[in-house]
Amino acid sequence: QVQLVESGGGLVQAGESLRLSCAASGRIYRINDMAWYRQAPGKQRELVAIITSGGNTNYPDSVKGRFTISRDNAKNTVSLQMNSLKPEDTAVYYCHAEVKPASWRSLEVWGQGTLVTVSS
């Protein structure tokens, strides 16, 4: 079994910063892409940031320049630094990873989610 555990959510005011972290544990041979998604009330889950095992990153325009994703391959962790937060960033944030528990097998794994609330 592979698990992703997130931490770092909370309540902040607009313009402030917050850092989310996610740690993978269990039987892990390799982790390919790692990403953060978010889901606001009444809306679909959307990609916030993605990082490959080689460190290439991609962001939607809504967070580009404000959010930064990073990972530590040795520790199987991924982080999301969120700066200049806006009320529209309020959502439950989910960590996601493509995990290979063995060389011949791949799993899509989700964290339990962490709530980020940005007040105006």
Image (cartoon, helix red, strand yellow):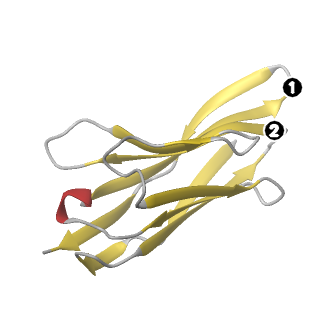
Q: Amino acid at mark 2?
A: Arg
Dot 1: element: loop
User: Where is residue 103 shown, x and y percent of the image?
Assistant: 86, 25
Of residues 112 and 63, the one drawn nearer to the viewer in this rendering: 63
Left-right relation of 105 to 81: right
User: Where is residue 41 shown, x and y percent of the image?
Assistant: 16, 49
> Quarter of the image holding residue 108?
top right
* Residue at image point 45% right, 53% down: 112
* Residue at image point 48% right, 71% down: 19
Which label belongs to residue 82?
none
Dot 2: element: strand
Q: Residues within 10 Å of mark 2 (few under 14, many from 20)?
A: some
* Residue at image point 52% right, 58% down: 68
Q: Residues within 10 Å of mark 1 (few under 14, many from 20)?
A: few
Left-right relation of 107 to 76: left
- Distance between the Cα atoms at labels 2 and 1? 8 Å
Report how many numbered discs are placed on residues in the image: 2
Of marks 2 and 1, which one's residue comes earlier in the chain? 2
Do residues under tags 2 and 1 come within 8 Å of each other at their CB atoms?
yes
Identify the residue under disc 2. 30
User: Where is residue 33 shown, x and y percent of the image?
Assistant: 65, 37
Identify the residue under disc 1. 103
User: Where is residue 47 shown, x and y percent of the image?
Assistant: 40, 39
Left-right relation of 26 to 79: right
Left-right relation of 23 to 61: right
* Residue at image point 70% right, 41% down: 1
Of residues 84 and 11, the one drawn nearer to the viewer in this rendering: 84
Q: Amino acid at mark 1?
A: Ser
Say if 52 sits above or below 62 in the image: above
Of residues 9 and 63, the one drawn nearer to the viewer in this rendering: 63
Of residues 18 and 39, the one drawn nearer to the viewer in this rendering: 18
